Amino acid sequence: MTWDELVRRTGEGDEIACYHPKFTPQVIKNMEMSYKQGHFLYRKGSGGNLIDVYFLPYTAVIGASQGEETNVVLVFRAQEGSVHGYPISEDELEKHKRRARQKGNNNV
């Protein structure tokens, strides 16, 4: 499958998002683990189940989401230390920024 086909499929519901195939699993892990270099959005959850949400903008395309190429990764860091992320579109990022502002983070 070509990159253009992968991008298109993220907009058709077949796949939510995908990293560009040029990135190895280790590179993806390193990108996600660099969340502290990104921007804090908000904290969700309660008690011992807190998750901090960050976004990292890159200067080049890193993946695709909602049928378009993107340079933004959304990263979730759980209180116990696990980290997971995935590419998001500009529209998705704006939704997360609105949520952050609703939770009192006006720095995004």
Image (tube, rainbow, N blue to C red):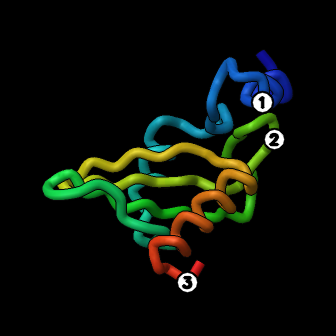
Mark 3 vs mark 2: in front: 3
Residue 92 circle label: none
Dot placed on the residue nearer the N-terminal end, 3 or 2 = 2
Residue 97, how many percent across, how many down? Answer: 60, 67
On the question of residue 94 being in view, the answer is yes
- Say left or right for 61 vs 23: right
Circle 3 crowding by C-alpha within 10 Å: few under 14, some 14–19, many from 20:
few
Q: Are marks 1 and 2 in contact (CB under 8 Å)?
A: yes
Sequence-wise first label, 1 or 2: 1
Q: What residue appears at the point 46 percent right and 54 percent down from the top-left corner? A: 75
Q: Position of residue 73 (x, y in %)?
A: 58, 53
In space, the residues marked 1 and 2 are separated at their CA atoms by 7 Å
Label 1 sits on residue: 11
Q: Residue 68 carries which label?
A: 2
Q: Position of residue 53 (x, y in %)?
A: 43, 60
Q: Which of marks 1 and 3 is in front?
A: 3
Q: What element carries label 3?
A: loop
Q: Is residue 86 above or below residue 44?
A: above
Report the amino acid beneath label 1: Gly
Q: Quadrant of the C terminus?
A: bottom right
In the rendered structure, find residue 106 and report the number of the disc placed on it.
3
Residue sitting at the far left: 48
Give, as a three-letter code, the residue at label 3. Asn
